[in-house]
Amino acid sequence: EKRALTSTHASLNGSVGETIANIADQFLNELTKREIGRQKCVDNGCTYFMSADSDEFYRVEELMKVKEFMVANPIYDGCACLMRFFYKSPTCELLPVDNRNHVPLIYKVQPGTKFMLAHPYPCVVDPTRTLSGVKRFKVFDRSYV
């Protein structure tokens, strides 16, 4: 089962386990929940979806701007933005800002895609949030979202 949920292109490098057999169950559980949510979007005729964690916060106007961009630019299959880290509340940001880690925002619902653990991506993201079959990916900078 672990092999079926892990990208054949995965470079584990100790991020989720040294080998497929050693991948911690927590990663597979999280990935499975994301895939169930994605499949529910497919089943309900959605055109786009988000797979967000409970500790993520977005400004409504910025998220709407990203949504409008994705709809207006259907060449992109998905997008991400740089992460920001907060301590105990959304008003206490940890500085300096992290300019390496990203969080996927919006994906297009399309055939041939599914969540695969540690699938290669154009930017650094949580290995449980990588979608196979994504060909064109937009990475927004901090000035946009």
Image (cartoon, rainbow, N blue to C red):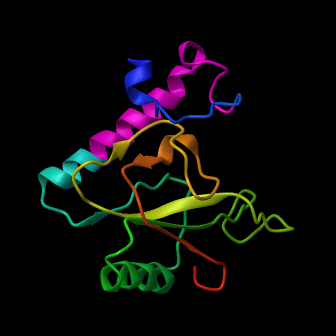
Q: Is residue 126 or residue 136 the one in the foreground?
A: 136
Q: Which residues are magenta?
A: 15-37
Residue at figure coordinates x 62%, y 60% from the top left: 102
Q: How many marks?
A: 0
Seen in the picture, residue 37 relative to 107 is either above or below; the reply is above
Residue at figure coordinates x 72%, y 61% from the top left: 85
Q: In which quarter of the view is residue 84 placed?
A: bottom right
Side of 40 where 9 appears, left or right: right
Side of 61 where 45 appears, left or right: left
Which residue appears farthest toward the right when viewing the image?
96
Seen in the picture, residue 21 relative to 27 is either above or below; the reply is above
Q: In which quarter of the view is residue 81 placed?
A: bottom right
Q: Position of residue 117 (x, y in %)?
A: 49, 36
Residue at figure coordinates x 13%, y 50% from the top left: 43
Side of 47 where 53 appears, left or right: right
Residue 41 highlighted magenta (yes or no):
no
Seen in the picture, residue 39 relative to 142 is either above or below; the reply is above
Q: Main secondary structure of the magenta part?
A: helix
Q: Is residue 119 or residue 143 the one in the foreground?
A: 119
Seen in the picture, residue 8 relative to 36 is either above or below; the reply is above
Which residue appears farthest toward the left when viewing the image?
44
Residue 26 highlighted magenta (yes or no):
yes
Q: Is residue 124 or residue 54 the one in the foreground?
A: 124
Q: Position of residue 67 (x, y in %)?
A: 38, 78
Residue at figure coordinates x 54%, y 13% from the top left: 21
Side of 101 where 117 appears, left or right: left
- Looking at the rendered image, the quarter that the N terminus falls into is top left
Q: Position of residue 69 (x, y in %)?
A: 40, 84
Q: Is residue 107 or residue 84 the one in the foreground?
A: 107
- Looking at the rendered image, the quarter that the C terminus falls into is bottom right
